[in-house]
């Protein structure tokens, strides 16, 4: 298995902040502002109005029409941006119409977005089935990393990450997620926990499997990163969702950084990882 490329500082010139003007968005706003200050980023606030029900195909994106739907959205955007802290740096707003899975990728391309930051409601069960998951639409379709901030996030917006958890899937290329995870951990001098879930391993074989897995995980870390990295390699015997949640809770993790794959051949793993993150407070999803 290849070692991750040399760790480089992240460059976040443009941060996209999709908002539905809900308390969840308000909770995520301080984190977008903190990142913008650290990296000198421009924040692009966007709200997408749902497409009209009778339209089967989303039309080309047009300037806002002077009807009550657009006027209401404009007013809500103006009210929401009043919450922006003074001196935050450059920011701008966009209003659009269409399905998020179409609108967000187009804006990411047009605005040269490096990171999407959004708040999640943490809906589960019937609510999620009825209302859908806007956050999942965004991070499944985004071509850049997505930082999700959940409803249980700590109230303090101070950007201080003591522990970063990076779950890895040995069947996937680890380089994209490790690049971001190690960059974030280095800049924050965080403890770095790399995790592999190995379910269904019989107890009598766990000792040898764990040793091999730890060696494999540690071999992924570049030598130069080991000079500063407070590395811990962990192997857990639960399925991925449970392993991630239990490790994050036991270690009091501040951020989970994990990959999201769109491979149809791995539908179970896609759903499992997505759900695990929605139950946690904050996580960076790296598309791969």
Image (cartoon, rainbow, N blue to C red):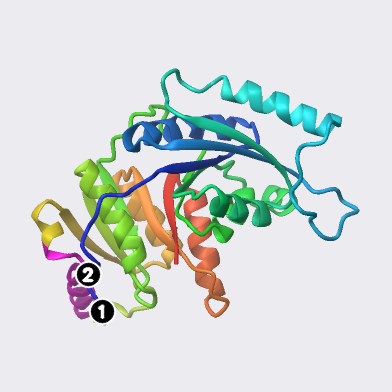
Query: Can you see residue 153?
Result: no
Vertical arrangement, residue 104 with respect to residue 24, above or below = below
Query: Can you see residue 143?
Result: yes
Vertical arrangement, residue 86 with respect to residue 208, above or below = above
Residue placed most toward the observer, 205 or 61: 61
Rendered image: mark on residue 220 = 2
The span from disc 2 to disc 1 (Cα, nearest Å) is: 7 Å
Vertical arrangement, residue 236 with respect to residue 230, above or below = below
Quadrant where the N terminus lies? bottom left
Residue 170, x across and y down, in percent:
34, 75
Residue placed most toward the observer, 237 or 220: 220
| Residue at the (56%, 73%) spot, across then down | 267
Q: Classify residue 105 by image quadrant.
A: bottom right
Q: Where does label 1 land, which residue?
A: 1
Quadrant where the C terminus lies? bottom left
Which structural element holds mark 2?
loop
* Image side of residue 216 versus residue 112, left or right: left
Q: Are marks 2 and 1 in contact (CB under 8 Å)?
A: yes
* Image side of residue 105 versus residue 130, left or right: left
Residue 194, x across and y down, in percent:
27, 60
Residue 114, x across and y down, in percent:
44, 50
| Residue at the (40%, 59%) spot, across then down | 258
- Give the residue furthest to the right: 54
Q: Does 209 lie within the magenta span?
A: yes
Bounds of the magenta span?
A: 206-223
Which structural element holds mark 1?
loop
Dot 2 or dot 1: first in sequence order is: 1
Q: Classify residue 62 by image quadrant.
A: top right
Q: Label 2 crowding class (10 Å Cα cut-off): few <14, some 14-19, many 20+? A: some
- Give the residue furthest to the left: 227
Q: Does 182 lie within the magenta span?
A: no
């Amino acid at each position: 298995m290849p070692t991750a490329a040399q760790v480089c500082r992240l460059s976040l010139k443009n941060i996209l902040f999709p908002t539905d003007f809900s308390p969840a968005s308000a909770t995520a706003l301080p984190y977008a502002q903190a990142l913008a200050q650290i990296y000198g980023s421009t924040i692009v606030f966007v709200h997408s109005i749902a497409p009209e029900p009778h339209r089967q195909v989303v039309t080309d994106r047009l300037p806002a029409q002077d009807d009550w739907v657009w006027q209401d959205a404009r007013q809500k955007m103006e009210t929401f941006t009043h919450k922006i802290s003074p001196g935050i740096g450059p920011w701008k707003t966009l209003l659009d119409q269409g399905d998020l899975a179409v609108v967000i990728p187009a804006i990411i391309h047009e605005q040269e977005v490096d990171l999407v930051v959004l708040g999640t409601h943490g809906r589960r069960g019937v609510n999620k089935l009825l209302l859908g998951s806007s956050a999942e639409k965004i991070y499944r379709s985004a071509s850049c990393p997505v930082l999700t901030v959940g409803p249980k996030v700590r109230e303090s917006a101070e950007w201080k990450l003591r522990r970063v958890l990076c779950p890895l899937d040995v069947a996937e290329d680890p380089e994209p997620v490790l690049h971001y995870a190690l960059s974030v951990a280095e800049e924050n001098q965080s403890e770095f926990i790399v995790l592999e879930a190995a379910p269904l391993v019989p107890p009598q074989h766990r000792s040898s499997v764990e040793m091999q897995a730890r060696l494999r995980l540690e071999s992924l870390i570049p030598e130069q990163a080991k000079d500063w990295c407070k590395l811990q390699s962990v192997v857990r015997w639960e399925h991925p969702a449970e392993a991630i949640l239990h490790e994050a809770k036991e270690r009091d993790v501040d951020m989970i950084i994990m990959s999201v794959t769109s491979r149809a051949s791995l539908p179970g793993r896609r759903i499992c990882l997505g759900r695990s993150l929605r139950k946690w407070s904050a996580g960076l999803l790296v598309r791969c």
